[in-house]
Amino acid sequence: MTRPHLDLWVNRALVGRLECPEPVAPRAWILGVAAVQVTVEAGATVQARLRAHTTGAQKPRLFELGTQALVQVALASAQAPDPAPPALPAPPALAAPLPAGMAARLGVWLDGTELASATLAQAALVLQPAPRAFGHVFCRWLRAGGIEPGFDLTDFLSLSAGVKYERLVSRPLQMGQVVAFGFTTRLRTRTPPPPAPGTPNG
């Protein structure tokens, strides 16, 4: 059985694809998740990364993000042509400077329409536990052949372990739609992003 998949781009470069491994049985479903995770660390530093994982995979794929990043995820059918960067403009908020008092912003767009933004205030950098925000695009592949895709975004919150994060946005996803997460910060990022494909190192 050939199933829909999730294609992943970082700053317009194709970095991966989440596909359903066969067979699904004996499980009732298999879940693929692309997560943009932003966590405040000591010394006015943030860790921002894309984490991609599928049920049963040995380990997730991790892509570190810089101080400004665009992550795009498309739900594509098995019959779709070879993936190309989504023909959507980069979110204008990526180019807009952060307002005074704001340390970081993580926004979500659906097919180019802005839905919500998580914002991190400078004053919140000292909070413990450290504030974090995240957005997911996921697809649950069902044993019977159907899919349950969707996406969400949380605000930057300082919550104890085990406390549920409320979602700013939580919606189903339709075939062919593109979710974009735009991240901007004036803080240092823990690890610089890798060079784009074809770019020499150094």
Image (cartoon, helix red, strand yellow):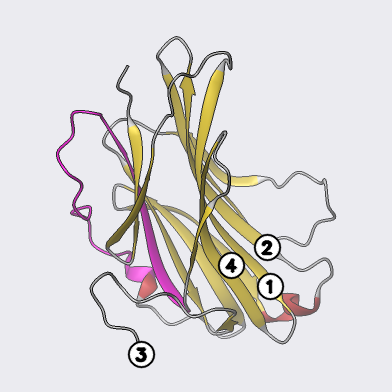
User: Which residue has dot 1 on it?
Assistant: 40
* Image depth: mark 3 or mark 4 in front: 3
Instruction: Identify which amino acid the numbered label 1 is placed on.
Output: Val
Tell me which numbered mark, 2 or 1, is placed earlier along the sequence: 1
Numbered range of the magenta stretch:
67-93
Tell whether label 1 touches label 2 (CB within 8 Å): yes
Q: Which mark is residue 119?
A: 4
Identify the secondary structure beneath mark 3: loop
137 shown above or below 175:
below
Q: Which mark is residue 132?
A: 2
Tell me which numbered mark, 2 or 3, is placed earlier along the sequence: 2
- Name the residue at 53% across, 64% down: 49
Nearest the eye: 177 or 198: 198
Tell me which numbered mark, 1 or 4, is placed earlier along the sequence: 1
Q: Is residue 18 left or right of residue 187?
A: left
116 shown above or below 54:
below
What is the distance, in whole Å, between disc 1 and disc 4 at their CAs? 12 Å
Nearest the eye: 80 or 172: 80
Instruction: Identify which amino acid the numbered label 4 is placed on.
Output: Thr
**Quarter placement of the N terminus:** top left
User: Which residue has dot 3 on it?
Assistant: 202
Q: Position of residue 4 (x, y in %)?
A: 32, 29
Instruction: Identify which amino acid the numbered label 2 is placed on.
Output: Arg
* Image depth: mark 4 or mark 2 in front: 2
Q: Position of residue 36 (x, y in %)?
A: 52, 57
In reply to whether residue 68 is colored magenta, the answer given is yes
- Name the residue at 56% across, 86% down: 100
- Name the residue at 51% across, 42% down: 33
Q: Position of residue 194 (x, y in %)?
A: 41, 75
**Quarter placement of the C terminus:** bottom left
